[in-house]
């Protein structure tokens, strides 16, 4: 199905770091931008490439307005993000299509929910978390297991810590693979040992995985080995 692109206005940009930006868009032709947490949009770019669009998961939750957020990491060898870094400014319009995708939550959260992310793969999982909390959706325990290399790379860290303080059923577990152990007192290594520890009893749960391909493939294999079926393991690959 061919996607239809509409002009989205950039209304705000936050430099999260040198390599990561948060872009906030408004859809002027819509009173309300309807999407499901976990879905993505396609951004069309004026670049010389066989594929001129790039897909990005929506990082914000559905609201009562026409605004949404994307969090994007710079890929210097590529064509898309260097163009964004150099040209995207507040006030300009960008062709955007969507929402698209089936990486979404069920209507009822009947079991514990484990959100496993690396890098900007936290975007759709953050959307899901905000949606559940903002709408007081009945839920069991929710775990956000977030893998990164260094503490400075932990996106939305302050926000996740705040959620953990305010919501007793939510737990944020960052895991760092390269941070100096003398300055970091949290979990180290990779995400796999964390969810295996939490769900060692093999209790019913739903797992949502998003981020680096190698992490997702390994997590899927490990969870399957623990006895969880594909109906309980949803994933979105980021190349």
Image (cartoon, grey):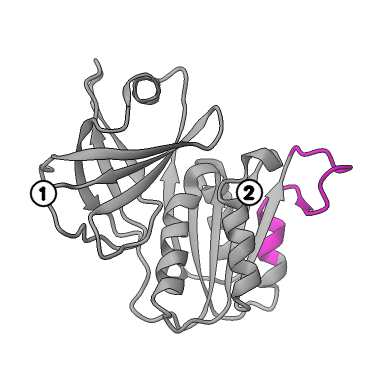
Judge whether residue 54 is colored magenta.
Answer: no
Residue 40 vs 34, above or below: the answer is above
Residue beneath label 1, please?
A: 29
Residue beneath label 2, please? 147
In the image, residue 85 lies at what x, y percent?
Answer: 40, 23
Residue at 22%, 33% in the rendered image: 94
Q: Which residues are magenta?
A: 178-196
Dot 2: what SS?
strand
Which class describes the residues within 10 Å of circle 1: few (<14), some (14-19), or many (20+)? few
In the rendered image, residue 22, in percent from the top left (x then y), is placed at: 43, 40
Residue 222 in view here? no
Instruction: Name the side, left or right, on which 152 lies relative to 9.
Output: right
Tag in front: 2 or 1: 1
Question: In terms of depth relative to the viewer, which is nearer, 205 or 55?
Answer: 55
**Secondary structure, magenta segment, majority class:** loop
Residue that appears at 24% across and 46% down: 26
Image location (x, y in percent) of residue 83: 34, 20
Q: Is residue 74 left or right of residue 65?
A: right
Q: Looking at the image, is 183 positioned above or below residue 131?
A: above
Magenta region includes residue 189: yes
In front here: 18 or 144? 18
CB atoms at circles 2 and 1 under 8 Å apart? no
Q: Is residue 216 placed above or below 163 in the rendered structure?
A: above
């Amino acid at each position: 199905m061919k996607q239809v692109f509409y002009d989205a206005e950039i209304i705000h940009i936050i430099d999260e770091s040198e390599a990561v930006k948060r872009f906030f868009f408004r859809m002027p032709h819509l009173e309300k931008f309807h999407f499901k947490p976990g879905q993505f949009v396609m951004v069309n770019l004026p670049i010389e490439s066989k594929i001129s669009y790039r897909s990005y998961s929506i990082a914000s939750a559905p609201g009562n307005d026409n605004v949404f957020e994307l969090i994007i990491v710079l890929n210097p060898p590529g064509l898309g993000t260097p163009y964004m870094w150099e040209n995207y400014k507040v006030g300009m319009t960008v062709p955007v299509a969507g929402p698209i995708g089936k990486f979404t939550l069920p209507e009822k959260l009947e079991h514990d929910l484990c959100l496993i992310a690396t890098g900007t793969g936290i975007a759709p999982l953050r959307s899901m978390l905000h949606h559940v909390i903002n709408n007081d959706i009945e839920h069991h325990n929710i775990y956000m297991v977030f893998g990164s290399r260094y503490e400075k790379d932990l996106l939305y860290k302050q926000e996740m810590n705040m959620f953990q303080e305010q919501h007793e059923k939510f737990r944020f577990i960052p895991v760092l693979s390269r941070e100096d152990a003398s300055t970091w007192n949290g979990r180290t290594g990779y995400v796999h040992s964390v969810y295996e520890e939490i769900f060692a009893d093999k209790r019913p749960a739903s797992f949502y995985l998003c981020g680096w391909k190698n992490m997702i493939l390994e997590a899927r294999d490990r969870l399957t080995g623990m006895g969880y079926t594909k109906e309980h393991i949803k994933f979105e690959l980021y190349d």
